[in-house]
């Protein structure tokens, strides 16, 4: 399973739509010892989402991000120049979609790794051909 910014936000905050489902899915992945894949771009974007609209205090953000970064049940894919270039190519090739560069990098990582299921709150993953687990 791939976790996007909105999926991590749903997991972090009980007020977020999909919180209970995100907790369930993350818990199931951990119990099955199936790593949750995310990217360095997602983690770079996440503090902005946690700050606003969620308004999570900075110390709590630090603990949450550090937990993700160091957890044995999370695999953080660092976006290297090749992945970055492919993400930019996808972003430019799809002017009909309002996908972000972070989203495009996520799609490239998922495709390269053969991942089908994603933990996002938005429909962009479905548009890109993946299964969205949060609704």
Image (cartoon, rainbow, N blue to C red):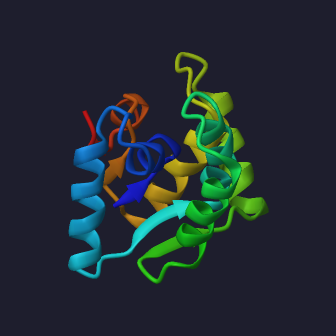
Above-or-below relation of 113 to 106? below
The residue lying at 52 percent from left, 58 percent from top is: 109
* Image coords of residue 107 (percent x, y): 49, 47
Q: Is residue 2 left or right of residue 61?
A: left
The residue lying at 37 percent from left, 28 percent from top is: 123
Figure label count: 0
* Image coords of residue 24 (percent x, y): 21, 57
* Image coords of residue 12 (percent x, y): 44, 50
Nearest the viewer among 94 and 25 is: 25
View extreme (top): residue: 96
* Image coords of residue 21 (percent x, y): 23, 47
Above-or-below relation of 16 to 26? above
Q: Quadrant of residue 48?
A: top right
The residue lying at 32 percent from left, 44 percent from top is: 130
View extreme (right): residue: 81
Nearest the viewer among 45 and 12 is: 12
On-image quarter of the N terminus: bottom left
Q: Quadrant of residue 73?
A: bottom left
On-image quarter of the C terminus: top left
Q: Quadrant of residue 132?
A: top left
The residue lying at 61 percent from left, 19 percent from top is: 95
Q: Is residue 121 left or right of residue 24?
A: right
Above-or-below relation of 118 to 64? above
Q: Is residue 12 left or right of residue 116?
A: right
């Amino acid at each position: 399973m791939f976790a996007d910014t909105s999926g991590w936000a749903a997991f972090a905050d009980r007020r977020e739509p999909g919180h209970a489902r995100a907790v369930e899915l993350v818990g199931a992945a951990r119990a099955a010892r199936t790593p949750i894949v995310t990217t360095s771009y997602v983690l770079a974007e996440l503090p902005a989402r946690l700050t606003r609209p969620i308004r999570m205090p900075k110390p709590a953000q630090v603990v949450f991000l550090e937990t993700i970064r160091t957890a044995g049940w999370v695999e953080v894919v660092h976006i290297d120049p090749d992945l970055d270039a492919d993400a930019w190519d996808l972003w430019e090739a799809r002017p009909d979609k309002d996908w972000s560069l972070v989203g495009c990098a996520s799609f490239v990582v998922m495709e390269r790794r053969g991942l089908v299921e994603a933990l996002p709150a938005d429909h962009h993953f479905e548009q890109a051909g993946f299964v969205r687990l949060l609704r």
